[in-house]
Image (spheres, grey):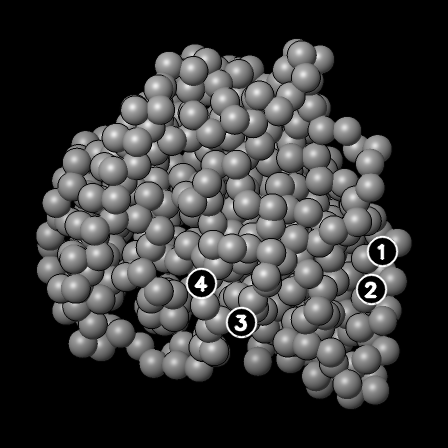
Amino acid sequence: MTAITDLTQASATELLALYRSGQASPTEAANAILDRIQRLNPVLNAFCHLAPEDTLAAAAASTSRWQRGTPCGPLDGVPAAVKDLILTKGWPTLRGSRTVDPNQAWDIDAPATARLREAGAVLLGKTTTPEFGCKGETNSPLTGITRNPWNTGKTPGGSSGGTAAAVAAGLGPIAIGTDGAGSVRIPAAFCGNFGLKPSFGRVPAYPLSPFGTVAHLGPHSMSVTDAALMMNVMKQPDARDWTALPPDATDYTIGLNDGIRGLRVAWSPTLGYATNVHPEIAAACEKAVRTLEALGARVEAVDPGFADPLDITTGLWFTAATVVWDTLTPAQQAVADPDFVAEVERGRAYSALDLQKLSLRRGALGSHMRQFMQRYDLLITPSVAVPAFDAKPAGHQTLTPEAMLGWTPFSYPFNLTQQPAATIPCGLTSDGLPMGLQIVGPMFGDALVLRAARAFESACPIPRPTMV
């Protein structure tokens, strides 16, 4: 392993190797990252809650375990962040919203948070999100604007924008995000990280998202191997999630480096309907596909054969927003994000019959894609059709379905179908902004998606921004 002089630039895998060899300790890593957070978070606004005393106490306990040669789990001592939609015991989960009272008992860990603690991860804090994770950029009346480490005038995307910005900027090597229409993959693509939306139900959730069975939890990480380590931890069962998949004995690190020779890969640069892909992204993804071919994949240019399901996604999303709205008092509604209010207003237009029709169309799409994936091992697309756009405050534009998600036509279909999908960096634009390649697997094919991403990463290492 190359000598690492800056612990903030070490992946989780590299940190664990340093702890094992005695060349660094969890306390040293935590202190280095907390110092960097103190310098960079005022610029990036990646974290909305920090508790350095808690972090350093957890790091000290981990250091003692490593000194005794008794690490408690596969992530012992690794600094990690948690998106502020995910319950974290002892810390407020405000969901990016002024409607949530911080003065209440915060005595529950969500399953993913609990599994990280059990594995020994050192929690750094909560990362910023738009209100209720309602959009693909990260701004809110509560926390303001979150910014992209590659260019602070640009958005990190959303809704896991704080999570992605933190990982990209060296404010912790791993973090948990959520993805209801692209909210792991959009910011991971904009910030140049690896991000995975696992098969729905593979990572247990509690409480279940009010946005329903489109909402996944998944890892953001500096490397594919880090994400595999996280999946080994986060996939562990939790009885609180009645939608969870059966227990999974897979070790996602085994076979990770087996390559992709002979895999059948469908390459769809537009999915048949995305007509406004940025030319540099189109070219970068085409080049990335040629790399996959050079690694031995059998690539066929083919569209999966479905129409743009934007109206299905936004219809389900907007009606779910009205469910959340109806839990709020008039005083809470008065301080809500104007973008969330706009979603609610659109959601009011849907009847129960409309909703059932959308659900049936969703089911047909899911069936279509399960059949399509019988012929291919993987589907490759761009991750997002555009590079990161300008960072602006909440309510800066009229919210329409197209404004909300029209620029990310490759992400939301696979929330509807519940398939695993990852984004991995595939280059920088001429303006120095990251571009992402999306790797979609068959349902339950999470390990295969990780393996393909690792093969690409081995040929095209993930670049890092130059923030100092």
- Residue at the image position 59 percent from the left and 61 percent from the top: 239
Label 1 near label 2: C-beta < 8 Å? Answer: yes
Mark 3 or mark 1: whose residue is earlier in sequence:
1
Q: Amino acid at mark 1?
A: Asp
Residue indicated by mark 1: 54
Query: Which of label 3 and label 1 is nearer to you?
Result: 3
SS for callout 2: helix
Kindly report the distance in space between the C-alpha atoms of the residues bearing marks 4 and 1: 33 Å
The percent position of residue 193, horizontal first and vertical second, equals 48, 53
SS for callout 1: helix
Residue indicated by mark 3: 232
Label 4 near label 3: C-beta < 8 Å? Answer: no
Front-most of residues 127 and 5:
127
The percent position of residue 398, horizontal first and vertical second, equals 43, 13
Residue indicated by mark 2: 58
**Which dot marks residue 245?**
4
